[in-house]
Every structure is written in C-alpha cells, then in structure tokens.
Image (cartoon, rainbow, N blue to C red):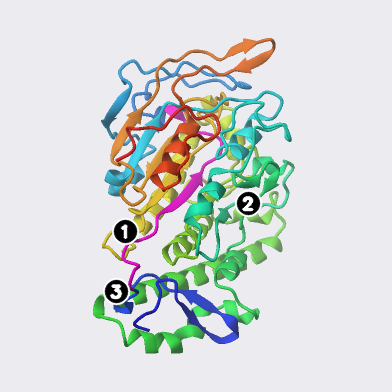
C-alpha cells in the first residue's frame, strides 16, 4: 500500500469500490502536484440585479419584457479592478471571500428565432456567435467542459460528469432548457439527476444491495489500510468515510420521502415537495467527492432548468412550493422573494466552496485552490431577459493561475437594446463571455488562441 496511487480503490463485496483521496502515508511518488480541475455551477433565470451587483441597490425594479435591457449604468463604478464588495446576495461567500472574483461586464449575443431561456442555458458554455452554427437554430457547439476534458480528463475514469438538481418528469420544454453540457451541436451530455443513480454510477456495483451501504462493505479492507496511515491521514480517512456515509444516509432519506409523497394527493408533482437545499447539497457532495478522489477533473452542475413552471420547495424560505420562473416575470410584486431565492442559490454555492477548501491536497493546498469553479447564469436579469452584464463569479485559482479576491469590472457603455429590421440586437457593453472561457482554457493548460466569439483573454485574471 506504500506505493498506492492517489486514485487507488478499496475493493469490497459485489464489485463495490471507493476511490481514495490523497494521503501522505501512501507515498505515491510523482503525484505531489495536484491536478487542475474545472467546474461550473449554473443558476437559471438570472438574478435580481439590485441585490447582486455592487452599486445597483438603488436601481428601479425593471418591468417584464421579451428581450430588452433596462439602463443599469452605475456611474460610480469605473472599468478596472476593485476591492470585492459582498452585496446582500453574495454575503454567503464571506468565509471564502479571498478565493472568489466577481466579474461584471461580460455579454453574450442573442440569436433571434429561438426562446431566450432555451438559448441562454444551452449556449452558456458554448458562447458561439449568432448564425455561426448551421446545423441548429441555436448557436450551440461543443461546450467548454468537454473541450477542457480533452486535456484535464486524461487518465480519469470519467472525462466529465454532469449533475443536475431537477428531478421533475413533467417537462413541457425541450432539452435545450434543461442542459448546459453538450458533446456537440444538438448532442446533449445527459446529466445525473437522481442521487441514488449518481451514487451507483460513481461507486460502481454489480448487485443492488452492494451500493446501499458501501462503507460497510469495504470496512475490512479499510481497517487493514488504516493501520498503515499516520495520525493526520487517519483523521482524513475518517472524515472521508463519514462524508460518504452522510451521502448514503441523505440519499436514503430523500428516496424514502419521495416514495411517501408519491402516495399523497398533491396539487403539484411529488418532487415539488422535496427539500430543495438538501437535494442541491447532496448532488453537490457527490460532485465534490468525484473531484476530490480523481474520478473526474471536469464537472458541471445545473441547479435548475430555465422557464420551467413546475415549482420547488425552497424549504428555508417558503412554506409551499414556488415557481422561480413565474416570480421572475413580476419582480415588482415578488422582488423580495426573488432576492431570497438568489441568496439561497448563493448559499449552496458557498457550501460547496467551503467544502472544497477544506479538502487538503498533496502539496498542502486545497481542492478549491486547484479548481476553477465558475458560478453564472445565461441571463443578466430574469425580468428583461437581457443577455448582457451577466452575473459571473469565479472561485479558486486553478493551481495558482487565476487571481482571486477582487471585483473585475469590464463594462464600458450601457443603453437600451436596439431593434433592427424587426430583430433585437444587444448592445456591446463589455466583453464577450467567451473571453472568460478562453482565459480559463489558457489557465488550465490548453494552447488555444480563440474560442467561439472571443476577442482576447482577460489579462486582469491571469497570474
């Protein structure tokens, strides 16, 4: 065991396997430098700008519109780098403030002819220029995560892993509304939505009972290994197994709750009454374990679908299930509730960041330090459906390649959306979102000079 790789497995009965995190006691020569990872946390429907963006607290509440843009100009905020100010929505990031960067002034162009929600989700990690893709009505090509996987995913069991916390089966929308990861144009990379199925896929088994209590099945092998570990590694070992056990217990709890709800006559589908925060954190825990143990180095997490009217139970906010999309169309009436939902999503993101920052790597850095973890939405505002001034937060430094703890403002001008020959045209406020993706590519070792409609890299982000 002294020469065990960081990706070594503890093998149990029935084919059950657990990937081990890095442990100093196991030696593993040549693995001192942790791998770089990339992860994406997509939030639907945009955000309430006055609570998310610095300096916009006094802005008027925008009215619902098809694809327009209110004047969100903040004359006091100049282009450049600023100290990071945690607005009400971003306050949950306080504990990891030094490891996140807010980026404002990133835009995408809308291609008329398709729904604004479908396009903002399915093209978020593509960012192709309008009409540049001929095989689809959407400007959608191979997404960033799958391009990164060609380099970062070598040697991992899974090149990429896609997660989602949308378990509803009553969808009336196309797959474009509910997927951000694509192998190529119109070839979706299906996301894992059921915690039990995701658990089974990550910790492969051959029998039904084998994956129900994995930690029980490998304890005998684990005890013999534990005796070879130093004190610090024994603590890490115990914490790791406890985290896996917690995932098992939570998956069982939600599975049982879902079964009980299915037997009750409810106005909404049973899944609408599942506690939203628990569900998101459980899927997030699975993603973190996969990144921690080297099962994958690239992951995406779509928190919820775009324009989906089936409600969710935000258990810490409201007593009954609520529709995020329907509230967004009436900010004037529901703005305080929407602000709570935005902060709720940020709390889940912060939970994952803190969890990743607590995972120690071989060189003493954390899992978060070696990851570029991007929070974002394809809409700048849920009411106006604007594609400009998107809410983007980059966490982690990708192994020291990205500067953190700042606010980088790229905005230059503001103005209403123009309408030319019956088509909406977004103004160029700042820089293309693809510039961020190109910057991340270079930071993660890809020798790429252009991506989608990029015009250059964001030098202010690179070390």
Any part of residue 277 in sight: no
User: Which residue was labeled with disc 1?
Assistant: 366
Residue 444: horizontal and vertical position, in percent?
Answer: 41, 48
Name the residue beneath numbered marker 3: 24
Residue found 34% across the figure and 31% down from its top: 408
Separation of residues labelled 3 and 2 (CA atoms): 44 Å
The local secondary structure at tag 3 comes to helix
The numbered mark, 3 or 1, whose residue comes first in the sequence reads 3
Give above or below for 29 relative to 414. Answer: below
Corner quadrant of residue 130:
top right
Return the residue nearer the eye: 318 or 48.
48
Q: Which residues are magenta?
A: 29-49
In the image shown, does 318 or 219 lie closer to the viewer? 219
Position of residue 229 relative to residue 160, above or below, is below
Mark 2: secondary structure? helix
Q: Nearer the viewer, mark 3 or mark 2?
A: 3
Q: Quick one: label 3 or label 2, which is nearer the N terminus? A: 3
> Measured from the top left, where is residue 200 in percent x and y?
59, 70
């Amino acid at each position: 065991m002294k020469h065990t790789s960081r990706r070594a497995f503890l093998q149990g009965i029935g084919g059950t396997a657990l990937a081990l995190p890095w442990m100093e006691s196991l030696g593993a020569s040549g693995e001192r430098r942790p791998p770089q990872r990339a992860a994406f946390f997509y939030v639907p429907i945009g955000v309430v700008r006055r609570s998310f963006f610095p300096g916009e607290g006094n802005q008027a509440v925008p009215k619902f519109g098809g694809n327009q843009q209110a004047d969100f100009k903040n004359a006091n905020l100049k282009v450049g780098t600023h100290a990071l100010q945690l607005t009400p929505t971003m306050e949950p990031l306080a504990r990891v403030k030094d490891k996140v960067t807010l980026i404002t002034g990133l835009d995408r162009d809308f291609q008329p002819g398709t729904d604004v929600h479908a396009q903002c989700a399915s093209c978020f990690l593509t960012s192709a220029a309008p009409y540049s893709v001929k095989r689809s009505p959407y400007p959608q090509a191979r997404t960033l995560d799958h391009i990164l996987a060609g380099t970062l995913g070598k040697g991992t069991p899974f090149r990429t892993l896609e997660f989602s916390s949308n378990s509803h089966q009553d969808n009336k929308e196309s797959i474009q509304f509910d997927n951000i990861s694509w192998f190529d144009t119109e070839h979706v990379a299906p996301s894992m939505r059921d915690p039990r199925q995701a658990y089974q896929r990550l910790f492969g088994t051959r029998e039904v009972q084998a994956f129900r209590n994995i930690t029980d099945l490998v304890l005998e092998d684990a005890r013999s290994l534990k005796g070879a570990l130093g004190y610090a590694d024994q603590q890490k070992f115990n914490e790791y197994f406890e985290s896996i056990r917690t995932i098992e217990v939570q998956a069982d709890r939600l599975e049982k709750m879902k079964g009980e709800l299915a037997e009750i006559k409810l106005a909404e589908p049973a899944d609408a009454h599942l506690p939203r925060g628990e569900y998101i954190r459980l899927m997030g825990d699975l993603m973190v374990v996969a990144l921690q143990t080297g099962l994958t180095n690239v992951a995406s997490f779509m928190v919820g679908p775009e324009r989906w009217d089936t409600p969710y139970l935000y258990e810490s906010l409201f007593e009954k299930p609520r529709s995020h999309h329907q509230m967004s169309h009436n900010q004037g009436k529901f703005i305080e509730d929407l602000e709570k939902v935005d902060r709720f999503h940020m709390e889940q993101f912060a939970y994952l960041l803190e969890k990743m920052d607590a995972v120690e790597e071989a060189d003493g850095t954390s899992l978060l330090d070696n990851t570029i973890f991007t929070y974002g939405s394809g809409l700048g505002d849920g009411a106006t459906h604007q594609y400009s001034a998107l809410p983007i937060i980059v966490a982690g430094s990708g192994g020291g390649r990205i500067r953190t703890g700042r606010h980088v403002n790229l905005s230059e001008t503001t103005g209403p959306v123009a309408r030319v020959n019956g088509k909406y045209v977004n103004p160029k406020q700042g820089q293309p979102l693809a510039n961020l993706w190109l910057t991340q590519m270079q930071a993660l070792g890809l020798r790429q000079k252009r991506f989608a409609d990029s015009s250059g890299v964001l030098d202010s982000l690179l070390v």
